[in-house]
Image (cartoon, rainbow, N blue to C red):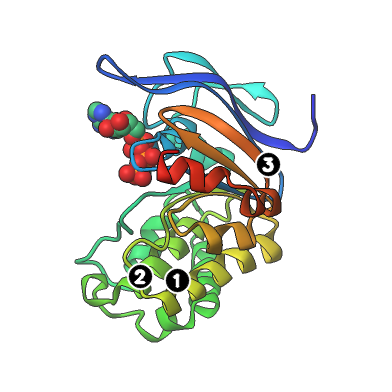
Amino acid sequence: MNQDILLQLQNASVSYGGVKALDGIDIALDEGEIIALVGPNGAGKSTILKAIFGLVPLDGGKFCWHGQQVLPRPHEMVRRGATFVPQGRRVFSRLTVEENLETGGFVVADKQELRRRMKEMMEFFPVLGRKRRVKSGTLSGGEQQMLALARGLMTDPKALLLDEPSLGLAPKIVKEVFAKIKEINEKHKTAIMVVEHNIKSLLDIASRGYVLDKGKIIARDTSQYLLESDILERVFMGK
Ligand SMILES: Nc1ncnc2c1ncn2[C@@H]1O[C@H](COP(=O)(O)OP(=O)(O)OP(=O)(O)O)[C@@H](O)[C@H]1O
Ligand SMILES: [Mg+2]
């Protein structure tokens, strides 16, 4: 067993009704690394993150956390140290920035510790500190994405699962979001699995990547290799 592997899907399959969304997936996230998950629409990228977090059941294969097979369920995964930030930056729009952060820290029982983490997040994302009492629904897209990230970080996770963090953001904001993701990884040694269509930006911060197509992993390699090879072009242009 590789001691560095934090979490892993082995020969995992998922179906929605009769439709197979994942077919024999092997994927691992090591402690402290950033990995990229790329592929065309409908390839099964979001389903991989959902399966890891326990939002969809596996109908074949297994999931391991620290080398031990477990049945993932969202609340238990949070307690183990995983956080999922879904596609579409879900924040509670009627709640303020501060209240959103508080909900992100629901497993933190110690109120003083909860305050400390909220303060830390508002320092790490200064815009959130400035807008702490503002209703989240009025924040810009980039600010909401920062808030979604910050909420996910309230539990100080060991593993962060991010689904399309740059979706719908302007190029300059995309850069900021990716810089923050890298900074989270470097400061806290958080292992991060990122799904993205913004492949170049993602592979710039990831050490390695998986290419997914029609529910199968068709390539896995270092980011540098994936960028230099023609595999991405072939998958995305359907060649
Ligand atoms: N709740 C669901 N019910 C039925 N089919 C689903 C459901 N969610 C996903 N699927 C199907 O499973 C397959 C994989 O979907 P998934 O959302 O994982 O793809 P994706 O790679 O994240 O795509 P995108 O880049 O568009 O977000 C698709 O064919 C999709 O239509
Ligand atoms: Mg998706």
Q: Is mark 2 within 8 Å of ligand 1?
A: no
SS state under label 2: loop
Task: Please provide percent x and percent y for residue 122.
Answer: 48, 77
- Please tell me whether mark 3 or mark 1 is closer to you in this view: 3
Q: Is mark 3 within 8 Å of ligand 1?
A: no
Amino acid type, residue under disc 1 in the picture: Val
Considering depth in this image, is 148 or 194 the residue closer to the camera?
194
Q: Are marks 2 and 1 in contact (CB under 8 Å)?
A: yes
* Image height of 153 relative to 44, above or below: below
Quadrant of residue 89 within the rendered picture: bottom left
> Label 1, on which residue?
174
Q: Residue at x 22, y 65 (%)?
A: 93
Secondary element at image label 1: helix
Outermost residue on the left side: it is: 94
* Residue at image coords 42%, 69%: 146
Q: Quadrant of the image for the C terminus? A: top left
Other-residue count near label 2 (Cα within 10 Å), few / some / many at <14 / 14–19 / ≥20 = some
Looking at the rendered structure, the kind of residue marked 2 is Leu
Q: Position of residue 170 (x, y in %)?
A: 36, 75
Mark 3 to mark 1 CA distance (whole Å): 24 Å
The mark tally for this picture is: 3
Reading the chain from its start, which is encountered first: label 3 or label 1?
1
Q: Mark 3, residues whose alpha carbon is within 10 Å: few (<14), some, or many (≥20)? A: few
Callout 1 crowding tier (Cα within 10 Å): few <14, some 14–19, many ≥20: some
Q: Earlier in the sequence, mark 2 or mark 1?
A: 2
Residue at horizontal 41%, vertical 54%? 164
Q: State the residue position of label 2.
A: 169
- Contact between marks 3 and 2 (CB within 8 A): the answer is no
